[in-house]
Image (cartoon, rainbow, N blue to C red):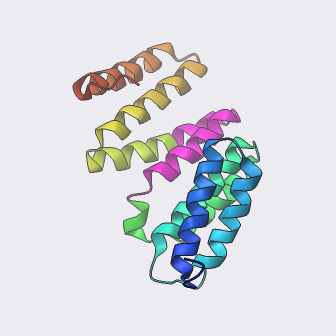
Amino acid sequence: AEALDYSFGQGAAHYTYALSQWGQSNYDIALDHLLDAEKFFAPITEDKGYKSSISQLKALVYDDLEEYEKAFAIYYRMIASMDSIELNSSDKTFNNIGAIHHKTYVLDSAEYYYKRALKIRLNRGDKYGIAESYHNLGILNYNRDSLEEALDCYRKSLKIKRELKNYS
């Protein structure tokens, strides 16, 4: 890609390398390559997918580094730039925001974002995502000592996981 001066390919290569480094907990290297990927994708206006993926991964890296304010800033910028169609497919973004709120014990906000993710997943019929959302809400309710609500969420999640034969 570099020899051909192919910006898209160079950006994709940096993103892929960043993803592999994140998976190995090499967060600083991952961030460096995500910044490089952003530079290559900046002039490309017709592909929002990679730009969104880069932003998602940057937020996840900051989450892993426990730099939650940086992660929130990225997620909230992403939401602000979405049109109505994108907002209705942004369940992972909402789930991730909920997870950070959950980690930082802002449980009302965590619940709000988990439920936004769940609503999108229900509308889409995404059974894996629905099971994940109910599981997350179960943990949240358990943390609140709302044991009946937690159990209800866990049962819903387990029922779906049994249907899918996926118990992870």
Q: Quadrant of the C terminus?
A: top left
Comparing 136 with 61, the one in front is: 61
Q: Is residue 75 above or below residue 102?
A: below
Q: Residue 139, how many percent across, how many down?
A: 53, 24
Is-magenta flag for residue 136?
no
Q: Residue 44, how many percent across, how many down?
A: 53, 83
Residue 46 left/right relative to 67: left
Comparing 65 with 143, the one in front is: 65
Comparing 110 with 127, the one in front is: 127
Q: Could you tell me how many numbered marks the image carries?
A: 0
Q: Is residue 144 above or below residue 15?
A: above
Residue 60 left/right relative to 65: left
Query: For residue 85, what is the image quadrant?
Result: bottom left
Q: Residue at x 34, y 37 (%)?
A: 128
Residue 82 left/right relative to 14: left
Q: Residue 17, how many percent across, how many down?
A: 61, 57
Q: Quadrant of the N terminus?
A: bottom right
Residue 163 left/right relative to 141: left
Is-magenta flag for residue 111?
yes
Q: Residue 51, how many percent across, how many down?
A: 54, 69
Residue farthest to the left, as pictured: 163
Magenta span dominant secondary structure: helix
Q: Is residue 7 above or below residue 25?
A: below
Comparing 33 with 163, the one in front is: 33
Residue farthest to the front, as pictured: 3
Q: Residue at x 64, y 40 (%)?
A: 101
What is the magenta range?
89-112
Q: Is residue 83 above or below residue 168?
A: below
